[in-house]
Every structure is written in structure tokens, then in C-alpha cells.
Image (cartoon, grey):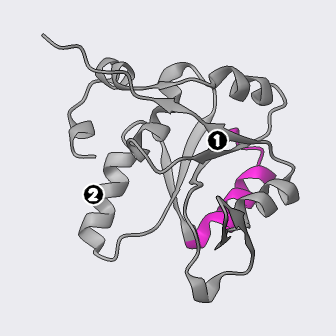
Amino acid sequence: MLKIISMSNEELKKRYTFTNLPEMEKHMKYGKGILLMCGHYANYEWVNSIQLYGLDYRSFGVYKRIANPYFDKMARDIRGRFDGELIPTVEATRTITKYQKQKVRGVYAMIADQSPKIERAKFWTQFMGHTVPVFLGSEKLARDLDMPVVYLHVEKPKRETI
């Protein structure tokens, strides 16, 4: 996360690739927002640089606020460096709904591999032979707002050695 502060756009694009941009572009022709489900690997900051790849959509990352206001601001500044906007989890449904009603062309990234705290779990399902709690917010939001859901596949190529 700290390295991205000084990294050039060109260096950033060398560090990773979005392998399913054509799938996103297919949905973009309809002018709707897209919910991007992301794995919790690599750097979350990369999602907010999606405009570097020529996509005519704003990027939004749903994130959990950091309790320390100084570090929360620093994280928002770093993650917002490429004109991406962070939306706190507690404001996600309201904000995404508002932007969709305003016809904002956006991709909304959410980390997809998290699970709710046991005491707050509302839905359980089988996963790899175990019963686990899962969030339903993304699915409900996509259905309610008629938005496509795309898994953002990020690949991090090996760095060239000198």
C-alpha cells in the first residue's frame, strides 16, 4: 500500500493485469454500474486504478473504515490516488443506490471472500465440506439495482530480474 504512493502509472500497470476486462466492457455497453467481486489477495489499491486501462467508468472501492482517523485518511488518500473513491461499508448500499439512480457509470469493488461475524450471520451455506456464514449484501444489491456482477481477476506477473 505504501509503495503505490510513489509508483508511476506505467510501473503500476507493469505490476498487475486485469485479465477479464473484455467481460466488464461487455456489460459497460449497457451503461449500468457493475459490482466487482474481488479476492482478498494482492493489493486492493489496484482496483481504483482501473481507469488507467481505458475504461470509461469511475471506480469505487467499498472498504471498512480504520478506527484511527489519521490512518483512515492516509488509506483513503493512497487508495484514491487514481481518482477512485472509497465508500465505507456502512454507507455502501445507500451510496451505490444513489449513484445508480443518478446514472453514474461506475464499477463498485467489494472484497468477496470475507465472512460475517458469527453473531451477525444471517445466511449459512456449504463451502468445501463445511457450513459457513456468508454475506448476502452484494447479491441483494445487484438484484435490487439490476447490476451485473463480475469477479475481478487480477494477475500479478513476476517482476523482471536484472
Q: Which picture quadrant has residue 126?
A: bottom right
For the residue marked with disc 2, what is the amino acid?
Met
Residue 152 included in the magenta stretch of the image = no
Q: Position of residue 64 (x, y in %)?
A: 46, 67
- Residue sitting at x 55%, y 80%: 117
Residue picked out by circle 2 = 74
Q: Which residues are magenta?
A: 90-106
Quick one: quadrant of the C terminus?
A: top left
Tags 2 and 1 touching, CB below 8 Å: no
Q: Is 105 on the left-hand or right-hand side of 62?
A: right
Q: Which picture quadrant has residue 12?
A: top left
What SS does tag 1 mark?
A: strand
Q: Which mark is residue 61?
A: none
Q: Residue furthest front?
A: 129
What SS does tag 2 mark?
A: helix
How far is the residue under mark 2 from the one under mark 1? 22 Å
- Count the numbered circles shown: 2
Q: Is 92 on the left-hand or right-hand side of 1?
A: right
67 versus 57 height, above or below: below
Residue 83 visible in the picture: no
Q: Position of residue 107 (x, y in %)?
A: 64, 41
Q: Is 88 on the left-hand or right-hand side of 126?
A: left
Q: Position of residue 47 (x, y in %)?
A: 49, 39
For the residue marked with disc 1, what is the amino acid?
Val
- Residue sitting at x 60%, y 55%: 112
Residue picked out by circle 1 = 107
Q: Is the magenta region chiefly helix, strand or loop?
A: helix
